[in-house]
Amino acid sequence: MKVTLAQVAELVGGVLRGDGALVIEGAARLSEATSKDISFLGNPKYESQMKSTQAGALLVPPGTDTHGRPAVELKNPPYGWAKILELLDKDLRDRPRPGVHPSAVVAPTAVLGEGVSVGPCAVIEDRVVIGAGTVVQAHGFIGHDARIGRDCFFHPRVTIRERVVVGDRCIVQPGAVIGCDGFGFTFHQGRHYKVPQVGTVELGDDVEIQANTTIDRAAVGATKIGRGTKIDNLVQIAHNVEIGEDCLIVALTGVAGSAKLGRYVTLAAQVGVAGHLTIGDQVQVGGKAGVTGDVKSGEVLWGLPAHPLKDEMKTIAAARRLPRLMDDLKAIKKKLGL
Amino acid sequence: MKVTLAQVAELVGGVLRGDGALVIEGAARLSEATSKDISFLGNPKYESQMKSTQAGALLVPPGTDTHGRPAVELKNPPYGWAKILELLDKDLRDRPRPGVHPSAVVAPTAVLGEGVSVGPCAVIEDRVVIGAGTVVQAHGFIGHDARIGRDCFFHPRVTIRERVVVGDRCIVQPGAVIGCDGFGFTFHQGRHYKVPQVGTVELGDDVEIQANTTIDRAAVGATKIGRGTKIDNLVQIAHNVEIGEDCLIVALTGVAGSAKLGRYVTLAAQVGVAGHLTIGDQVQVGGKAGVTGDVKSGEVLWGLPAHPLKDEMKTIAAARRLPRLMDDLKAIKKKLGL
Amino acid sequence: MKVTLAQVAELVGGVLRGDGALVIEGAARLSEATSKDISFLGNPKYESQMKSTQAGALLVPPGTDTHGRPAVELKNPPYGWAKILELLDKDLRDRPRPGVHPSAVVAPTAVLGEGVSVGPCAVIEDRVVIGAGTVVQAHGFIGHDARIGRDCFFHPRVTIRERVVVGDRCIVQPGAVIGCDGFGFTFHQGRHYKVPQVGTVELGDDVEIQANTTIDRAAVGATKIGRGTKIDNLVQIAHNVEIGEDCLIVALTGVAGSAKLGRYVTLAAQVGVAGHLTIGDQVQVGGKAGVTGDVKSGEVLWGLPAHPLKDEMKTIAAARRLPRLMDDLKAIKKKLGL
């Protein structure tokens, strides 16, 4: 990477402040940047580092004091940061070669679009269709009759079972499993009798599934993940769940069967959502909360069972004063002769 | 799939109501079914859809109002549903071919039973014994000296480490790891010194292990999963745990070392069970609970630490009235001059 | 394994009590040991089994009543136990053969040290450097430019993405993913825009990563795991986290982005640590706790949000007396005419 600060300003759509000819060769956090690096202020928590940083240039919100350092001002520095890291990423990652590695096993009935790359020891089963430009890295598995869109990037060791449908530009990290059986049993003659899971999974465009996350196929019909939704590591999405567009679901969260989430829902880490619930749009659930009832759009929840965040904060504060309150009560009862 | 409703009644052991010659070509949920589909009423929550559904036929409990639609009545509709989905499943899944795929690596000392199927890039190490009819799909790994029963189905990317013993008819989903090292260390000279995990894992017959779940091998002896027990995605079973028969363990749950569970135990999602505990038969633990002491048979628990569900419901209700109670107390203290 | 009790005493640095010529052929838990086995007392909970055990010899703390059985006394029996299990482990595990299995795919630019073993279907990309004596078992994946130390043991199906750095003597269990993308997005024009994760992961010497755990690469810079730290199954370590030396992080725990942990920190199972926090040395966090603020060295925490364990115990005890307290309050209000 070698760009001038003027080029950076153009790339990120920001306003240049200082020497546009300054050459930037890297990007680093404020505390680690050198004079050849650009850095950024993304979290007010780190504003105190603006003075001490050794960064050669900065991406900052308009009006930030950069202590004389050249900068590019823009409303959302993290977006500019993302654009710069895209340049770095191109330098740092080997580009997968189009074509099928000789150690891969691709069924003759599979149809691969132009420029598709299939890495070492990957396995593509019968009648799979993969759109142009998609990359399946080493040890990838795509089950029969799956349909994968264009320009997806499947990191090593992705498992996509039979008949799953994936949109365009989806990114899947290592170890993720899409289309595993839902946990469906019925009690019969004293045993748990397996209900075959004959449905599938549908991922919209621009979905990202992070490492070792599992998305169960539907019992019948489809488990659906809406366009633009991003799911972090080690998340469990159960059968027949439907998640709307542009949601964020953070690590170690579980969403139980047939739950429906709206758009722009955020579930923080280690959240649980019970089965068969309906969650509205723009709902936010705090870390470790357990949602046990339907939720209206716009609500912000915490606790177990989850209720409005404000109420939970009050409940926690009161609960922690409880031991003292017990003493008060004893004194009152004594005074009243109760 | 193409069956008459009379054939369905016979298959599921139910009572035909209406035209037995009606041809069924598919199965779908009430809200998605068409006139060629059969659907079912498995959860009273969906009874309101009995009128609006477009399903051509229904599986229902005796006496259900089907609004004139042909139906099969049976006590447990989900069991009938499972039998129908078995037919669909046969249509929808490619049957693995018996034999060893040329890209698989099978040790000459491994013994494969009749009709065993080993998929692409699978690896079977020395002295492994696999019973007749078992399927090991793509990228499966079975470590040396493991003994696998008959008619098991290992989906792609299953890892079974050395010396593990698996019963008959077990199903393992992608990414599950059986026989990984337990988390055993002892503090020695200021460091955590590894205790080698030389034991193994024993799965009984008809056990199912879902995707990306991990079952640690014992330090010595065996971690044991009883016949018919089903374990959902992303569950952690630690070393030397012993789980009885016919248990259900739901996603993201962790059972710590040397805990013993009885029969018919249900652990809901994200439950934690501390180490060295004894849990009786038919115990039920609610989602996100943390079990920190021994539990008698038949108990129903919730909370952290887990205690009887009824008590936990009362505690939660009271805790959420706490902020108001604080106000009451203030008023009382004022009145009493305290 | 075939050793005399005198040899055991020497191996573990303990004091022989009884017949040093006694031959030991195995090791087992107190309840499962036979007369040819040695067993140990590691947890006082099992002291009652000292009488009934059939073990031929015992490892015990000095002064333990072994009911006349020959024994080796040492201060920390679990350490002696570990040394004995090392002998058993050598007997029980096939030693990987040095060299590259013909089905593995190793880039010509990769540099493998002396005695390195690369198992079936493993994939090693360009410019990877692997130190002497390291084992990469079946289905291992090591991305381009990764640098792996000496004498590491990577069990089957380990994923190490590009540019990750691993120290000496690290052990990684199946399904672990090291260097997957951090969960980084910025909100731009109504969508979640991906922030490329161009950093890496650095594991110190003697680190162990258990099965299906995920360690995200940094956005920029490195996610760091200190020497001697052990991380259990199904743990999520987010981007730019820095964990000190000799920590223990138990199953299903999540540590959010940019959190910093000191040395000798213990996080019990299913703990959550929020992002951008600083946790001191020797901090202990109880199971299922959620840490939401900075923590000073030496603190012992529990609860959500986590606070001192003692306070949490009092809060729980008080909360569970709440329903009765509510009745008291009603009586008081009635008496006071409130």
Image (spheres, coloured by chain):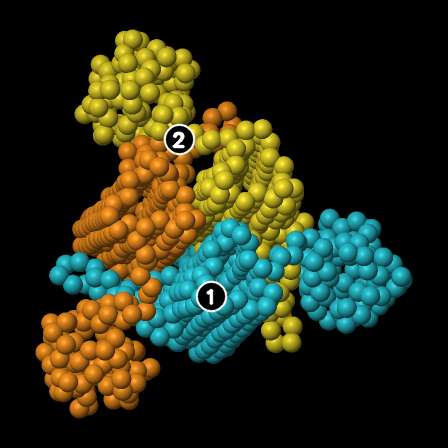
Chain colours: A yellow, B cyan, C orange
Amino acid marked by disc 1: Ala
Q: What quarter of the picture does the N terminus of chain A occupy? A: top left
Residue drawn at point x = 73 percent, y = 50 percent: B31
Residues at marks 1 and 2, CA–CA distance in whole angstroms: 39 Å
Chain designation of label 2: A
Return the x and y of residue C168 as percentages of the image width and height: 22, 49
Q: What quarter of the picture does the C terminus of chain A occupy? A: bottom left
Residue B294 visible in the picture: yes
Does residue A225 lie above or below A189 as drawn?
above
Return the x and y of residue C152 as percentages of the image width and height: 27, 52
Amino acid marked by disc 2: Asp
Return the x and y of residue C159 as percentages of the image width and height: 39, 46
The residue indicated by pointer 2 is A94
Does residue A9 lie above or below C133 as drawn?
above
Return the x and y of residue B128 as percentages of the image width and height: 45, 67
The residue indicated by pointer 1 is B110
Residue drawn at point x = 41 percent, y = 16 percent: A11
Does residue C3 lie above or below B93 as drawn?
below
Furthest residue in direction bottom, as rendered: C68
On the picture, is A326 further left or further right than A79? left
Chain designation of label 1: B
Q: Quadrant of residue C82?
A: bottom left
Q: Disc 2 on helix, strand or loop?
A: loop
